[in-house]
Amino acid sequence: MTNNKLVVYESKDIYKILYEIKEKLKIDLIFLEKKKDLEIYLNSNPNDLVLSKKKIDNLNQIILNNFPYKINKLIEIINLKILKKNFLINSNLSIGKYKLDINSKKIYLNKQELDLTEQEIKLLTYLNNKGKAASVDELQKDIWGYSENLETHTVETHIHRLRKKFLDTFEDKNFIISKKKGYLIKKFL
């Protein structure tokens, strides 16, 4: 499905309505009825949206306090909240000692910044999420959409250029490491 989840809290009827149109919403729906269940769920999923009729402290929440809602208006509210949440998350990703802002296509270390291309962002986030070495074939397939075993130096060329940018801007020559099994970000050593 998707990475976006919406927890409907205590409102079984609203959950049923949203479940009928969840494909249009492009979200995963979860229904929770008890406050204890909501607390347990949010401990491990703190960024998920919660839809409820009353305010709950410290949540990324949609409060339905003016019933009845037109369904189109409710969908619009949910989609806007998801967009805002994703924008904020993408503005402050940690990659080792760096902060990556996907929205502005920049990576930061203290007050220094470096502009990145779309492919460089894809490469960095992929390596960051992977958590271990990624082979050239893997990167060709998953980042560039090439078939495996294709003779190309795309990966090596991009890695070389990205390393040079990090060296020139941050004086960091070891941010992306080459290992026998592929490439990885230094923090995973």
Image (cartoon, rainbow, N blue to C red):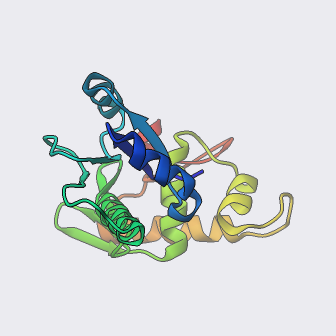
> Where is residue 38 shown, x and y percent of the image?
30, 30
> Where is residue 84 shown, x and y percent of the image?
30, 66
Residue 3: in sight, yes or no? no
State the residue in front, 92 or 185.
Answer: 92
State the residue in front, 16 or 32.
Answer: 16
Relative to 159, does residue 128 appear above or below in the rendering?
A: above
Relative to 11, does residue 72 appear above or below in the rendering?
A: below
> Where is residue 185 shown, x and y percent of the image?
48, 48
Question: From the viewer's perspective, is 109 left or right of 86?
Answer: left
What residue is at 69 percent from the left and 68 percent from the top? 144
Quadrant position of residue 8:
top left
Question: From the viewer's perspective, is 52 left or right of 154?
Answer: left
> Where is residue 175 shown, x and y percent of the image?
43, 53
State the residue in front, 30 or 17.
Answer: 17
State the residue in front, 144 or 8.
Answer: 8
What residue is at 36 percent from the left and 37 percent from the top? 45
What residue is at 24 percent from the left and 51 percent from the top? 61
Relative to 88, does residue 1 appear above or below in the rendering?
A: above
Question: From the viewer's perspective, is 47 left or right of 130?
Answer: left
Residue 166: in sight, yes or no? yes
Question: From the viewer's perspective, is 74 left or right of 132?
Answer: left
User: Which residue of the protein is positioned furthest toward the front in this rendering?
Assistant: 68
What residue is at 13 percent from the left and 41 percent from the top? 57
The image shows a total of numbered marks equal to 0
